[in-house]
Image: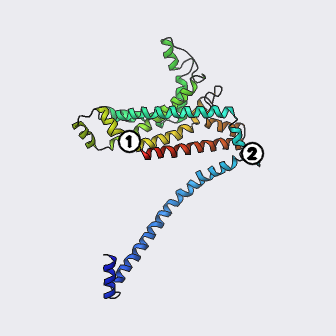
Amino acid sequence: MKYDDWYDMSTHSGQESGLPRLRQWITEARWFTQETWIGVGLVIPATVMMLVIIVYPTIRALWVSLHSRSFLNLEQVEWIGLANYEQLFADPTFTIAMTQTVLLTVGAVVSMYLLGLGLALLLKENLPGLGVLRSLSMISWVIPPVVIVIIWSWMLEVNYGLVNLIFGIFGGPNKSWFGSRQWALPLVTMLRVWKDTPFVAIALMASMQSIPKEYYEAAEIDGASRIQKFRHITLPNITYISMIMIVIETIAAFNSFQMIFIATGGGPVNSTEVLGTYVYQQAFMEYALGYASAIGAIMLLLLTVFTIIYVKIEDTD
């Protein structure tokens, strides 16, 4: 009923026709208010948890980065402003860690996405035995990082490692791979790729399976090749999931610590030193909490800038 009609009816027939409408509005307002408060009540626990686990530690770390503070004497805190940040950009080890973090992140994310995309294209096909392969492909993702490092350390061991035994048969080199300055960083990058590629593949495969089959049928009628269907149908329809996977894996690779620390500890001779291991070294070995917090603040800033720019670029496309 339009407002003019309701007004005319309420004017000519008194308040009897207008009151039911008013009661309905009041009932709807009460229902909306109740539903809103129910939603707010459900969101509050998660919000409080986010504030306690993420927001407060982040603000606290930024505050600590502006002070000189040591683990050896937590009560002694001295305001030094941006001195920690000035020291960072004059620190050659920080430059090495930053460079190697970027190299590891780019290498790992690009490799994970390309391998995951290829694996997803294979797994989405209805071929015999692919159901078992889908299950087996997830093994490396569910294995704990510590176990992954132990497995590969055994395989790359100098005296009895499988890799060195195979190389020895064909006359290849026999070396301590994790102890090599040349190979240590590519190997820890490979560990990251080996672990997370199945996760990317399963996510992309699920996105591919949601694409309507009619698109491919229409393309076949038009005589499109497999490459053309992949380029013009598959890729455009998995853009959103691809963006999510790239952002998630970039954050994970940029913050790499556990596998690198267990495998090499940042060595040999800083050849696998990344920002994650350097933060640990400064905080828990050098006891420089303020300096370590400044490194963490730089990591947060870089990841935030990357995420914003990347999401904006994807939105414009």
Question: Please, is residue 150 above or below residue 51 in the view?
Answer: above
Quarter of the image that includes the N terminus: bottom left
Query: Residue 128, how many percent across, how many down?
Result: 29, 31
Q: Which mark is residue 149?
A: none
Which image quadrant is residue 15 in?
bottom left
Q: Which residue is mark 1?
A: 238
Q: Which residue: 29% across, 44% down?
A: 212
Question: What residue occupies the far left of the structure in this picture?
Answer: 221
Query: Residue 52, how many percent across, how many down?
Result: 60, 54
Q: Which residue: 68% across, 38% down?
A: 88
Q: Which residue: 53% across, 30% down?
A: 189
What's the amino acid at mark 1? Answer: Ile
Element carrying mark 2: strand
Query: Residue 279, how many percent across, how many down?
Result: 65, 39
Q: How many marks?
A: 2
Residue nearer the viewer, 22 or 222: 222
Element carrying mark 1: loop
Crowd class of label 2 (few under 14; some 14 to 19; many from 20; radius 10 Å): some
Q: Which mark is residue 68?
A: 2
Q: Is residue 286 left or right of residue 98?
A: right
Residue nearer the viewer, 45 or 51: 51
